[in-house]
Amino acid sequence: MPYAARIQPGTRVRLKDHDPAESGGLDKEAGQKRFAELNAELDALQEELHAAGTHSVLMVLQGMDTSGKDGAIRSVMHNLNPQGVRVESFKVPTDEELAHDFLWRVHKVTPGKGIFGVFNRSHYEDVLVVRVHGLVPEPVWQARYEHINHFEAMLADSGTIIVKFFLHISKKEQAERLHEREEEVGKAWKLSAGDWREREKWDAYQEAYEDALSRCSTEAAPWYVVPADRKWFRNLAITEALVETLRGYRDDWRAALEDLSQAKLAELAAYRKLLEEKAE
Ligand code: ADP
């Protein structure tokens, strides 16, 4: 069984069916060992993605406050070559962004070929926070699920490999993490009264997530539910899903690199021949 649950297109997600504290039958030590192995493979896959330049990767991270989006980026990406990685964080939209359609700011920063792009929050905020707080009328956010599916299908058609992760934590674990931030001086900088205010809307958020995951998990851009109460397991589950996905492209990338190598060698041979002819 894969560690993260891939949502089959067209199925109805109930988050209560997914245990946030799941650990795949592993203890932390075994989990970290497996993580290290898979992470090394991810490193090699990124190298080939980057060199082949035929595809891009878009990893979307969503989750409640304290679910570990930042921590996941730090851990999962730590071995990758920074030259081929772009991380984009989506905050409250600026006036200029609000003056455009909701995908305008997103499309501008999608990863180009060879790049491993990470979205820390994403266009899904426009059917999450926007829906929960009623920032636009319901018909407007309702129409967005379909816009998102079309947008992602278009990116996929253009060679973008999309993987979307919902970091699933329990309400109890969130309370512990928020209290930890208050209690540990080194973590207080992460505090925000807004996190407690948002927590009051926990149920509305879970419902909004269930809709987004149910309506926008497609073959081309699947959602995964990642058990995230245990940080080590969250990192392992994300890495495993990424590696599983990217392995499917490895042969294509190697073939592209082989062609590239042959072309470069032929170019060099032609150049040397020309030199020899000149020297004669
Ligand atoms: P983070 O919590 O991701 O570490 P911030 O504390 O800056 O970073 O939070 C970003 C905030 O921006 C979140 O509260 C998020 O809900 C909000 N946000 C992101 N996108 C939108 C959007 N499209 N509309 C309204 N709010 C948004």
Image (spheres, rainbow, N blue to C red):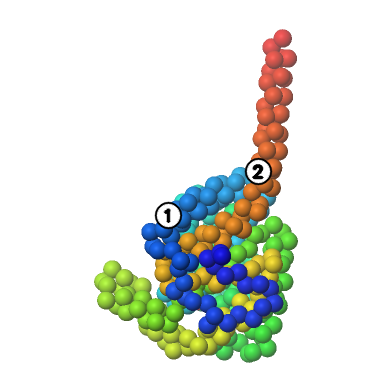
- Res 136 → quadrant: bottom right
Q: Where is residue 112 shown, x and y percent of the image? A: 63, 56
Element marked by disc 1: helix
Q: Which amino acid does label 1 sit on?
A: Lys
Q: Which residue is drawn at 69% across and 47% down?
A: 252
Q: Which amino acid does label 2 sit on?
A: Arg
Q: Is residue 183 left or right of residue 134?
A: left
Residue closest to the eye, 95 or 4: 4
Q: Residue at x 43, y 85 (%)?
A: 199
Up-down relation of residue 267 to residue 124 (above or below): above
Residue closest to the eye, 100 or 162: 162
Q: Where is residue 173 shown, x and y percent of the image? A: 39, 78
Distance between the alpha carbons at the discs numbered 2 and 1: 27 Å
- Res 271 → quadrant: top right
The residue at which mark 2 appears reads as: 254
Q: Residue at x 56, y 65 (%)?
A: 1
- Res 78 → quadrant: bottom left
